């Protein structure tokens, strides 16, 4: 009797829990050698009349046996990582900037650009072009640069600053630089809305005046170069 009992004690014991209808993991007294799980897609009938057909078309039972908790945890970590990776890719695709398709020129944008460029037409000084859309402007500042018999420079042209009759060279240079850069960057857009020639004419008008403000030495013996930074009507 004692030898039989000792042989029983030496045999390995496997703890198995079978859980019906619940599908929960229950460890066996802090020891987990294997767990058998049963997942039923549809509830079983508790009626004694087994011959009565079920109202479900099909009923399938899946039995899952986990023999090692380490592999089970590894499976869970990998599954969660794959799900998070898929979600990250979806969010990345949603928030990535997309290349805008060409839908034709916007009427509002065309009007805004046209009005902004027309402002420069209204501020032109000098021999005013006859084909300008601004009809209240005329020739002005035709004697700019004529300071008498001692100093004479051709400073006709350019743009008036804001609402006064002063012409400032450095603000004009800054403005012409920005306009030129927009044409370099958005040349095609200007062409699509029909304002490319318009903006080029404004840039040319300001550039020709800026060239007049820089007067190099008359000859090699001259000791200075003249640069006009501002002009006022004569």
Image (tube, rainbow, N blue to C red):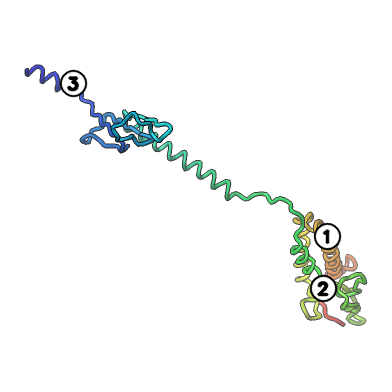
Residue 208 appears in which quarter of the rendering? bottom right
Judge by depth and name the residue closer to the eye, 51 or 172: 51
Q: Which mark is residue 85?
A: none
Judge by depth and name the residue closer to the eye, 69 or 177: 69
Estimate the x, y position of residue 107 in percent, counting from the top left: 76, 62
Whole-Å distance between the Cαs marked 1 and 2?
23 Å
For label 1, count other residues whose C-alpha is less than 10 Å away and answer few (under 14), some (14-19) or many (20+).
Answer: some
Secondary structure of the residue carrying numbered label 1: loop
Q: Is residue 216 visible?
A: no
Q: Which mark is residue 11?
A: 3
Name which of mark 1 and mark 3 comes first in the sequence.
3
Q: Which residue is mark 2?
A: 159
Name which of mark 1 and mark 2 comes first in the sequence.
2
Secondary structure of the residue carrying numbered label 3: loop
Estimate the x, y position of residue 24 in percent, counting from the top left: 30, 38
Mark 1 vs mark 2: in front: 1
For label 2, count other residues whose C-alpha is less than 10 Å away and answer few (under 14), some (14-19) or many (20+).
Answer: many
Q: Which residue is mark 1?
A: 194
Relative to 202, say whether 55 is above or below. Answer: above
Secondary structure of the residue carrying numbered label 2: loop
Estimate the x, y position of residue 16 in percent, counting from the top left: 25, 29
Mark 1 touching mark 3, by CB under 8 A? no
Whole-Å distance between the Cαs marked 3 and 2?
104 Å
């Amino acid at each position: 009797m004692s030898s039989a009992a000792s042989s029983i004690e030496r045999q390995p014991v496997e703890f198995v829990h079978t859980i019906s209808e619940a599908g929960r993991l229950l460890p066996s007294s802090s020891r987990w050698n294997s767990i058998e799980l049963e997942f039923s897609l549809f509830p079983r009938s508790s009626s004694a009349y087994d011959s009565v057909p079920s109202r479900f078309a099909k009923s399938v039972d899946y039995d899952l046996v986990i023999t090692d908790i380490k592999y089970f945890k590894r499976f869970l970590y990998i599954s969660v990582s794959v799900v998070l990776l898929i979600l990250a890719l979806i969010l990345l695709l949603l928030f990535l900037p997309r290349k805008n398709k060409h839908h034709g020129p916007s009427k509002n944008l065309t009007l805004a650009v046209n009005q902004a460029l027309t402002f420069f037409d209204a501020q032109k000084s000098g021999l005013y072009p006859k084909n300008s859309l601004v009809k209240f402007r005329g020739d002005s500042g035709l004697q700019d640069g004529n300071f008498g018999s001692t100093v004479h420079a051709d400073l006709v042209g350019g743009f008036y600053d804001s609402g006064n009759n002063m012409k400032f060279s450095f603000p004009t240079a800054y403005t012409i630089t920005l306009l030129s850069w927009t044409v370099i960057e958005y040349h095609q857009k200007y062409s699509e809305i029909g304002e490319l020639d318009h903006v080029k004419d404004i840039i040319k008008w300001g550039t020709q005046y800026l060239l007049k403000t820089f007067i190099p030495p008359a000859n090699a013996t001259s000791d200075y170069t003249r640069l006009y930074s501002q002009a006022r009507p004569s």
